[in-house]
Image (tube, rainbow, N blue to C red):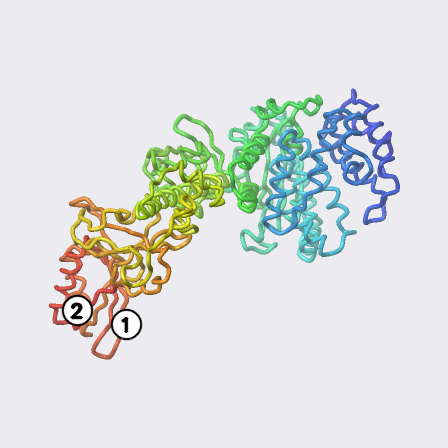
């Protein structure tokens, strides 16, 4: 276990002006508080916070963070109180310890919904000071290093959680060394056989390739020095988990992998990075498609480096990373490399300016306020944690970083939620392109917008960013709610009119307590969804009202539609107007046959689905005779010359001979009908049964098609299907 003076010495190596008194006080306080507590390994519990502090000294963090790491378990696991911490160490350290205490109470390995909620709480806990997250990551790293003392089942759950959440979070914060160790320890516990197999292969390969690595290091150093570039060149073997993931992703064996070794070239200046790249590419052939410049376009975790792969000595693929010392520090320490931590300053405004990683964290935290449920939030955030990036530009030159595989829809939502919600098309590099085009590095994307547009619900399954999915889901829900609210308003207006009582939003608001709803809009939406019947609302507003309507086949509960057969005309002016399948109301036509203008129609309210329109002669309606509250007055309301088509279904029996289907479809085409679907079944050797779904203008149009089909010799019978 680390001694008191050793902790102070570790901090003073990178911060000679460290507050020794604070560190000593934190050490003694935590040691006394934890006393003789033991861990699962049998070691003193106090050793754990000291190891966490030691990990953070490797990241060169400020005195307050180191002290908070030493104290981070005291409030949760000892008799110490937060008030005592605040009084003894000040509010800054108290706030850090409080955030860590809240995180420790979370259980991210519980079932998915609870895991999502706890993940939200974790991010909210680091919202005010990202150092809380850095201590938590160090805490998780030490726990993973000692995971062998846990029971097997718990060991597996903790490793899964680490691989799912903490390792990607460390990567997003730019702390690559920590991310790689967390991944490796998780892999070791989740699949020990695969881990040992890859480790054995790597050991064998290392023994064979030791001289090759030295040769490449010396060759690179010599070539760079010859061009006046002083560089430090180091080669290292990739970690087992990284190799395993590549084998899984590319479906290849270990023997088929060619880039097991990676070499790092550290130079003095930015200019020397590109000069070194020139030396490398003029010395050995580059592997096409393996060059990436993260200096001109840094990753969202602040990572900056040039990556390239060449065919080096011995025809060996050599993966190279070229960067300056400052870039290397950020690559290793990530968000912890920012100078404000060395100065002991907690300035989120400065950090937001300096760090892309912090900007990403803030955007992710901002999503918490936008109403997704916890499970969806966890799913969206995991998507963003794991994806590689592609960089695109707006027409004004603004750089937009997106996950690999992103589309212009993702791009639109990354620019602004309103841009995504109103997107109807896009131009990529000046050319009109589909919204589902996969974006490539360097694409310039211009979004074409239309005010009043609502994003289709299908987009949700086609985008890859969490923000786009969350925004589409919210917009879809809002649109559906507007539909149900509009439908509910119309249903209630007609219900109150039928009852002979006045209807207004004010009267509805007065009945909210009796209806157990918070707002009038909630009542309207519930009626539109079929969760609340109109008669119940009338009685809630007017308790003395008696509903004398009768259900049954003698009038269908008053829900009878237009029988005129003329567009725009109606015998039921009080019915809800039907204008076809539009976005204004949740109305759809019966699957078995549909309905067309000229039919007498009725609407059936189905909870959660809206209103289904049936022709009045549909036999399906008999099933609703005893449910009068579900019958809705509807009427056709179409302008003369409307170009809307409506669904209909016909069944016919045709003679089985060559050309019969062609004759049937030709009749429909000649009459300007549109066929949506055809199904055929051989009835006998001589006859075939056909079912044809088509769309027509109105009943007159449909009847003309049916009459012409009946006149054909190859057709023995034609009937309309009405459900």
Near-viewer residue (78 or 119): 78
Near-viewer residue (214 or 167): 167
Q: Residues within 10 Å of mark 1 (few under 14, many from 20)?
A: few
Residue 436 can be seen in this image: no
If the image is split into quadrants, where does the N terminus sit?
Answer: top right
Q: Please, is residue 219 above or below residue 115 in the view?
A: above
If the image is split into quadrants, where does the C terminus sit?
Answer: bottom left
With 648 as the anchor, is 105 left or right in this view? Answer: right
Q: Are marks 1 and 2 in contact (CB under 8 Å)?
A: no
Whole-percent x and y of residue 372? 52, 42
Q: CA distance from mark 1 to mark 2?
A: 16 Å
Looking at the rendering, which quadrant does residue 301 occupy? top right
User: Which residue sits at x=20%, y=47%?
Assistant: 643
Looking at the rendering, which quadrant does residue 618 occupy? bottom left
With 671 as the anchor, is 270 left or right in this view? Answer: right
Q: Residues within 10 Å of mark 2 (few under 14, many from 20)?
A: few
- Farthest residue, direction top: 17
Whole-percent x and y of residue 721? 25, 65
With 354 as the anchor, is 24 left or right in this view? Answer: right
- Farthest residue, direction front: 544
Query: Dot 2 lies on which element?
Result: loop
With 327 as the anchor, is 668 left or right in this view? Answer: left
Whole-percent x and y of residue 363? 54, 33
User: Which residue sits at x=31%, y=54%?
Assistant: 603
Which callout, 1 or 2, points at the residue further toward the start of the chain? Answer: 2
Residue on which disc 2 sits: 659
Residue on which disc 1 sits: 681
Q: Please, is residue 473 above or below residue 621 in the view?
A: above
Q: Please, is residue 341 above or below residue 609 in the view?
A: above
Query: Dot 1 lies on which element?
Result: strand
Residue 216 can be seen in this image: yes
Whole-percent x and y of residue 439? 42, 40
């Amino acid at each position: 276990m680390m001694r008191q003076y050793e902790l102070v010495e570790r901090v003073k190596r990178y911060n000679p002006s460290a507050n020794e008194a604070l560190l000593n006080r934190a050490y003694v306080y935590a040691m006394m508080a934890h006393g003789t507590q033991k861990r699962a390994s049998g070691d003193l519990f106090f050793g754990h916070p000291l190891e966490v502090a030691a990990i953070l000294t490797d990241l060169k963090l400020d005195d307050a963070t180191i002290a908070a790491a030493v104290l981070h378990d005291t409030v949760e696991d000892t008799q110490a109180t937060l008030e005592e911490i605040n009084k003894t160490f000040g509010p800054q350290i108290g706030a850090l310890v409080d955030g860590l205490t809240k995180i420790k109470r979370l259980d991210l390995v519980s079932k998915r919904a609870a895991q999502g909620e706890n993940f939200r709480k974790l991010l909210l806990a680091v919202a005010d000071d990202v150092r809380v997250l850095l201590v938590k990551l160090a805490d998780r790293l030490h726990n993973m290093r000692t995971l062998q003392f846990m029971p097997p089942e718990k060991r597996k759950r903790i490793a899964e959680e680490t691989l799912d959440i903490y390792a990607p979070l460390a990567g997003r914060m730019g702390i690559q060394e920590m991310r790689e160790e967390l991944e490796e320890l998780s892999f070791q516990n989740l699949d020990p056989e695969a881990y040992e197999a890859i480790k054995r292969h790597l050991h064998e390969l290392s023994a064979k390739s030791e001289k090759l690595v030295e040769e490449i290091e010396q060759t690179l150093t010599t070539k760079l020095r010859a061009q006046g570039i002083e560089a430090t060149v180091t080669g290292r073997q990739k970690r087992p988990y990284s190799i395993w993931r590549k084998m899984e992703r590319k479906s290849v064996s270990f023997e088929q992998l060619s880039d097991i070794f990676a070499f790092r070239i550290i130079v003095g200046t930015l200019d020397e990075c590109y000069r070194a790249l020139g030396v490398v590419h003029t010395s050995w052939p580059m592997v096409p498609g393996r060059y990436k410049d993260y200096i001109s376009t840094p990753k969202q975790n602040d990572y900056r480096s040039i990556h390239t792969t060449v065919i080096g000595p011995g025809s060996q693929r050599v993966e190279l990373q070229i960067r300056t010392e400052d870039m290397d520090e950020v690559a290793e320490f990530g968000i912890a490399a920012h100078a404000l931590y060395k100065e002991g300053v907690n300035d989120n405004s400065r950090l937001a300016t300096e760090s892309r990683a912090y900007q990403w964290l803030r955007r992710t935290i901002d999503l918490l306020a936008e109403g997704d449920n916890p499970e969806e939030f966890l799913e969206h955030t995991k998507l963003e944690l794991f994806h590689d990036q592609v960089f695109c530009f707006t027409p004004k030159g603004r750089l937009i970083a997106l996950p690999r595989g992103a589309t212009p829809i993702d791009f639109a939502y990354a620019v602004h939620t309103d841009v995504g919600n109103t997107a109807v098309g896009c131009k990529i590099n000046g050319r009109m392109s589909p919204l589902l085009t996969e974006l490539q590095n360097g694409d310039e994307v211009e979004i074409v917008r239309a005010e009043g547009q609502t994003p289709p619900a299908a987009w949700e399954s086609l985008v890859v960013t969490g923000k786009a999915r969350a925004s589409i889901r919210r917009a879809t829900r809002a649109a559906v709610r507007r539909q149900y609210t509009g439908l509910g308003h119309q249903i209630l207006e007609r219900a109150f009119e039928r009852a002979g009582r006045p209807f207004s939003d004010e009267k509805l608001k007065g009945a909210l307590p009796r209806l157990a709803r918070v707002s009038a809009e909630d009542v309207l939406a519930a009626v539109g969804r079929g969760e609340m019947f109109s008669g119940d609302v009338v009685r809630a507003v007017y308790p003395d009202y008696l509903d004398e309507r009768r259900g049954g086949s003698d009038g269908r509960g008053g829900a009878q539609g237009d029988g005129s057969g003329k567009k725009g005309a109606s015998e039921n002016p009080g019915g809800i107007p039907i204008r076809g399948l539009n976005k204004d109301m949740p109305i759809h036509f019966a699957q078995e046959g549909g309905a067309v203008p000229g039919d007498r129609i009725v609407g059936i309210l189905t909870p959660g689905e809206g209103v289904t329109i049936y022709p009045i002669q549909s036999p399906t309606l008999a099933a609703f005779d005893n449910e009068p509250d579900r019958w809705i007055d509807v009427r056709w309301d179409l302008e003369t010359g409307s170009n809307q088509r409506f669904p209909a279904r016909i069944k016919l029996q045709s003679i089985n001979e060559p050309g019969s289907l062609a004759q049937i479809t030709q009749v429909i085409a000649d009459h300007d009908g549109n066929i949506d679907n055809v199904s055929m079944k051989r009835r006998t050797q001589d006859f075939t049964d056909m079912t044809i779904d088509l769309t027509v203008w109105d009943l007159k149009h449909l009847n003309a098609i049916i009459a012409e089909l009946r006149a054909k010799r190859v057709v023995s019978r034609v009937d309309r299907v009405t459900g």
